[in-house]
Amino acid sequence: MRKNTPVAYLGLGSNLGDRAANLLQALLALLSGEFKLIKASSIYETEPVDYPDQPTFLNMVIALTGEELEPFSLLEFCLEIEMRLGRRRTILRGARTIDIDLLLLDDLVTDGIRHGIELILPHPRMHLRRFVLAPLVEIAPALQHPVLGKTMRKLLDEADRSPVVRIYYP
């Protein structure tokens, strides 16, 4: 009997340069690996959070699968893509060409460091972020948070209403 292939949910964001093109380049780079795209949300436009003095973001969430989907390797791959696409970490939560966050990997709960890379799953702030929850609800509304036990739909309903998150129309 074959085990189900794991599913990872990734949040993509950009607020520098051609934001939509940055999201597409990140998505294509992710698919150049051994991963298969299951679903992709619409693109959403969002006011910045935590560090408000920066341009607005475009965000989306994707679901990927793959035979060898290992969380630290996937996160390392995401960080490599960010670097290739010009991400520079100068200000914590500041402006960026691309941001790729590993939000969930099945129902895995972990907090650790490997090869200098810190990984916390589920993502520690995802349940507070409308810019993550709105696109996640679009593609997986009944998905349950492995720690909080609530669906993504319920988490979105409970999330703070600011900042405004709306579907992006170029």
Image: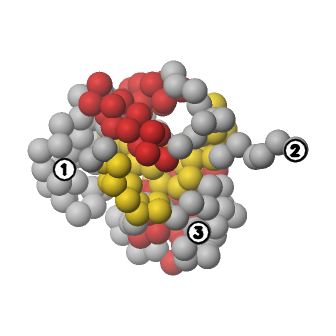
The residue type indicated by label 2 comes to Met
Quadrant in the picture for residue 170: top left
Where residue 33 sits: x, y (%)?
52, 25
Q: Residue at x 47, y 40 (%)?
A: 74
Query: Which residue is labeled 1 in the image?
Result: 94
Q: Position of residue 88 (x, y in %)?
A: 18, 37
Type of amino acid at the residue the image marks with label 3: Pro
Which SS class for mark 2? loop
**Side (left or right) of 34 relative to 160:** right
Q: Depth check: 137 or 164 in front?
A: 137
Tell me the residue that label 2 is attached to. Answer: 1
Question: Which mark's residue is nearer the viewer, 2 or 3?
Answer: 2
- Alpha carbon distance from label 2 to label 1: 47 Å
Asked whether 39 or 46 is in front, the reply is: 39
Q: Is residue 45 visible in the rendered structure shown here?
A: no
Which disc is residue 108 wearing? none
The residue mark sitting in front, 1 or 3, is 3
